[in-house]
Image (cartoon, helix red, strand yellow):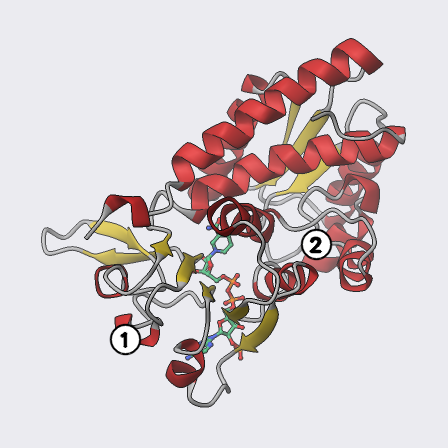
Amino acid sequence: MSDDKIIDGKAFAATVRARVKTQVEALQKDHGITPGLAVVLVGEDPASQVYVRNKARQTKEAGMRSDEIRLDATASQEEVLAVVDRLNADPGIHGILVQLPLPDQIEENAVLDRIDPAKDVDGFHVINTGRLQVGLPALVPCTPRGCIMMLKERLGDLSGRNAIVIGRSNIVGKPMAMLLLQESCTVTIAHSRTKDLAGLCRRQDIVVAAVGRPHFVKGDWIAEGATVIDVGINRIPKDDGKTRLVGDVDFDAALPRAGAITPVPGGVGPMTIACLLANTITAACMANGIDEPA
Ligand code: NDP
């Protein structure tokens, strides 16, 4: 077992955040722009509160403007839409993120669709989805963007490689597959109806697991030397009654065969917020018609 096989998402995310900070400084100095990110939280879901707090802290640490808008769990759809409208109209806000899940009385798609696509740093708006699909510049969902960055950092050119994405959700699987295709990979998208998944996986240079089932991908599904990106975040019980996080891949069994693999925790997860900050830079530059600073 060798540690250099393990892709350290925490360390890589720190380098992405450092780059974002330098970009913020350059945007302020050269263009007088301070990128701004607004996060909207409806209700008091404990996990969402932690995410929102982390996002706000990292946004401030990067030197950006950070707005946090908190609404009661009983807020109406109209109230949430009014907040989105106000943020859409605020020229100092370049990115808007509405923390999901939303309470039952609020229709998620109506809220996501109300966000100005140019400020849609989550990349969930149909306009951004469509732009990604046809290869136009787009705001891309953060988790897949982070996965691609890690793959390119580890493997360099991805062109011609065989890649499988297990999972076809709108937030991870589908955009991940599109990004791999953009990198000229030959892409297989697998889902719950896929036949002979193990056999398909064994033919791949890259395996991306976004299923949401603990240890779903077995070690012997991984071809010798393949790169494994584990998006899954699953909480499982431990013997002492507490819980721990595991991925969708049976890490210990996959590690000896893989050429490189992301751990859970400490792999894809930390990259997601770093990419949110990177997306806010992208949005601020696109809004002002300027190239992203190096
Ligand atoms: P979804 O539940 O939306 O999608 C899961 C996908 O897995 C579906 O497409 C489903 O197929 C597929 N699937 C389910 N069972 C099987 C099976 N037996 N064989 C093959 N495919 C199967 O999940 P998400 O995409 O939202 O998230 C996936 C995982 O990634 C979760 O663990 C989530 O917590 C994690 N995640 C992590 C993030 C991070 O920052 N690291 C960010 C976002 C998500 P079908 O469509 O046919 O039902």
- Disc 2 versus disc 1: distance between alpha carbons? 34 Å
The residue that appears at 45% across and 57% down in the rendered structure is 231
How many residues crowd mark 1 within 10 Å: few (<14), some (14–19), many (20+)? Answer: some
The residue that appears at 32% across and 62% down in the rendered structure is 258
What percent of the width, then of the height, locates residue 221?
A: 33, 76
Task: Give left or right: position of 174 versus 133.
Answer: left
Q: Which residue is the extreme one toward the bottom?
A: 195
Q: What element carries label 2?
A: loop
Q: Which residue is the extreme one toward the left?
A: 240
The residue that appears at 88% across and 28% down in the rendered structure is 288
What percent of the width, then of the height, locates residue 147?
A: 52, 51
How many residues crowd mark 2 within 10 Å: few (<14), some (14–19), many (20+)? Answer: many
* Quarter location, residue 250: bottom left
Q: Name the residue under label 2.
A: 124
What percent of the width, then of the height, locates residue 76?
A: 71, 47
Split into 4 quadrants, where in the image is the C terminus?
top right
Mark before the other along the chain sequence, 2 or 1: 2
What percent of the width, then of the height, locates residue 280?
A: 70, 33
Give the total number of marks visible in the rendering: 2
* Quarter location, residue 230: bottom left
Can residue 55 be spotted in the picture? yes
Q: What element carries label 1?
A: helix
Q: Name the residue under label 1.
A: 220
Closer-to-camera residue (87/77) = 87
